[in-house]
Structures are given as C-alpha cells and as structure tokens.
Image (cartoon, grey):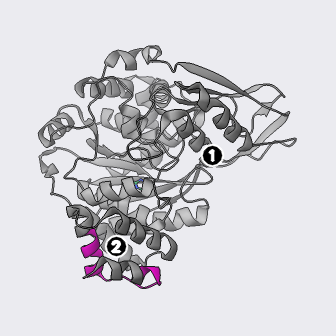
Amino acid sequence: MRMYDIIKKKRDGGELTREEIGFFIGGVTDGSIPDYQITALLMAIYFRGMTVRETCDLTFAVRDSGEKVDFSAIKGIRADKHSTGGVGDKTSLVVAPVVASLGLKVAKMSGRGLGHTGGTVDKLESIDGFRTTLSDEEFIGQVNGIGLAIVGQSKQFAPADKKLYALRDVTATVDSMPLIAASIMGKKLAADDDCIVLDVKTGSGSFMKSVEESRALARLMVDIGKSAGKKIVALITNMDRPLGYAIGNSLEVIEAVETLHGRGPEDLTEVCMTLAGRMLSLAGYGTPEACMQMARRTLSDGSAFRKLLEAVGTQGGDPRLIEDPGRFPRAKFSFSVQSVSEGYIRRVDTEEYGLASLALGAGRNTAEDKIDFSAGIFLRKKTGDHVRKGEEIATLYSSDREKFAPAAAKLLAATEIGSERPEEEALVYDIVE
Ligand code: URA
C-alpha cells in the first residue's frame, strides 16, 4: 500500500477502506509516514469529509494506536467529560473536582490548546510545579486515593491522536467533523471510562459554527460511544461568546477557582453545573436536575474547591496559588481596550477573541512555541452589555508590549456595537442522548 495512493483517493472524493485507514494510522504511530503526507491526507479529509463507516474505522484505529493502559485497578465509577473546544472554556477545572468530590473517579487526560481554543493542560501548567505527566502507577494511585488526577496525553496513550492533533493545530485542519469525532472518541474509548459527557460547543468560537453541524457531530460521537457500549450523552452549548470573562491560562485558572468558591460568572457556573449534573446522573446518582443541585452544593460547602486544592498539591503544584490566586505571577504589562462607540454589544466573533489571546502569547502559532502563562484577555463587557464611548471593554495582558496594538485591533474589529440590545441566547441548546 502507498500513502500517495491513499491521499489521491481521498483527494478525488473516494471512500477509504478499513485497511487504508489502518495503514495511515499505523504509519502515523510508528513514524514511517512523513508529516507532509500526513497533513496532505488531513487536508483531503477536511475538504472531502468521511462517511460514518470511515469515521468509525478512524476512531477505532486511533483508539488502538497505543498501548492498552489497564485502568481496571481504579475502583469505583469512572466518569469523564470532554469539550470540542472553545474560548475561555475552563469547565474541566470546575467540573472534574465537583464530581470527584461527590465520589466519581475522574482519571482525566486533557489536551493542549488547539487552533484558537485553549487546552486544560496548558492552563494547569500555569500553576508552578504542577506535573501534567505522571507514570501509570502514579496516575492510577492518585485517582484511587483522592478521586481526581488530570494529566496530558502520555506517549503510549492513543499516540496517533497526539501526532495528528499537533499537526492539525498548525495546518488549519482542526474544524473537520470526522477528524474531531475520531480524535475525541478515539481517546475516550482508549481511556475506557464508564460514563462520558461531551460538551459540543457551537457558534463563532467553536469549530462547528452552526447548531445543526454541532448536533450532527454530537450524534456521530454519541453513536460511536454507544456502539462501544458506553454510557454517553452530549450537550450542545453556546460558544457565540467566550465562557466567563477570562481568556488565557493563569487568568482562567483564577476564574475557575472563583467559580469553585461559588463566585464565578453566571454562564460558566451554569454550564459547569449542567455538565456535572449529567455526569452524576449517568453514573446513577439521580435525575439530572437532582444531580445539578448536588453539584451546586459542592460549591457552597467548599468540597469541590478542596478537591481541586488536593489534586493540585498531590500533582506537585503550588497549593498557595489555589488558596490565594492573587499570588499567580502577573503579566509584565497590561493594556486597556476602549469602546469606540456607544451602544450594546450585539455580537462578538469569539474565534477572533481566541486568536487575539493567542497573539498576546497565551497560545502557540507553531508546535514549538512557548506559552506566556499570564498573557490573555479579561473581558469587562460581554454580549448584551451596554458600553459608553471610551469605556473599557477588555484588559489585555502580555509580557510583550508590542503585541497589544494588533490584539486590541482584532478585538475591536470582532466586537459589534449597535443601538439595540440583542436577545438573550440559550446557554445549552440541546442534549443528545
Ligand atoms: N478536542 C480534541 O481532543 N480533539 C479535537 O479534534 C477537537 C477538540
């Protein structure tokens, strides 16, 4: 079999066989296919798409690309959530400790930033000393001990996805339904959790811009999960605006901690409680509504906050940063972005907000880039808010002053201001079971 022929077949709209997909993923995993051929096929898939059968075969090949980690040593019900990616999406940092504090076992393998979206692993690495790499024994031991561990993908775990993820990130091939489905479900099935809740983002800041596309992606992933015998549900949630006010790594950790104290932004808290409620409900704790109330109580009684603190300390992170987020290192410089007109913020291009944060140093432009952990954006105004001319709409943070002007221009261009207040939008559009 030749990679050239596989690329040509997909380029011309053909349907790849299970063997061809297996050959591709095998070559990605053992390094025998060069990056230029991998990315050529990714681009062909981006334009030509894949049938459900091809997507399932790709998912299972990704799942089987690594060594099988034996998670059977973890006692209890294993649950996980996974987001398709958004801007200001720090839900994992809230949801994981909430459900772990109620007894679920969360052995979480998270990703780095992808395209314009942030990643949980990058956020956690903004906590001084936090180790996102643990041995299998440490990982399983921590989950058994305290119910929660969050790590990045190890080399042995679904390695084909690790490679594809990094290449998609820098070749504009992220927002493809089959590639997203195979990436997420390949990992979820390899991790072999009992209960899976997917947060499928929809809108200008997500990879799927319309509710219909997001629903189709959700359906595809839920069907793949069901065919593998998983308890799985997908929520379609609003990403037409950033979630919360903070965009950027340490800024988002600080906002997540505030949320665990019950002082978080309403939209973020609502989405987190809905996700946590669904995870608990899938695990048999009761109806989604009752489970949501249970989840809320972990914020008011401090148990979810204590769980995050415990997990950070156990993974080598400085717990003082979680106890007192004012201790997080500050960005060297800040810059105030002011409105150029008066009115209501009618809509924002959330992807552009994510790209502005990236441009400040909060993400990568190439796979080798180093992240500026304190860089990012703190929004002072969001969609629906009224602004006066000259009023601050956002504060930018970076260790490089030169980055402010282009990021501010991007942010302003992405913010539509008009005289009429926009209609309220739902936070959760749909649930696909
Ligand atoms: N998250 C993933 O893990 N993979 C994707 O392709 C998109 C979001």
Q: What is the distance, in whole Å, between disc 2 and disc 1 at their CAs?
A: 32 Å
Region of the chain picked out in magenta, as a range: 10-25
Residue 198: which quarter of the image?
A: bottom left
Name the residue carrying label 1: 352
Using residue 81 as the reference point, say whether residue 151 is left or right of it.
left
In percent of the image, x 73 and y 38: which residue is there? 412
Q: Is residue 378 visible?
A: no
Residue furthest to the right? 419
Name the residue carrying label 2: 56
What amino acid type is highlighted by mark number 1?
Answer: Glu
Of residues 121 and 8, the one nearer the viewer is 8
Q: Is residue 288 magenta?
A: no
Which quarter of the figure is the N terminus placed in? bottom left
| Ligand 1 position by quadrant | bottom left
Say if 401 sits above or below 76 in the image. above
Using residue 345 as the reference point, say whether residue 46 is left or right of it.
left
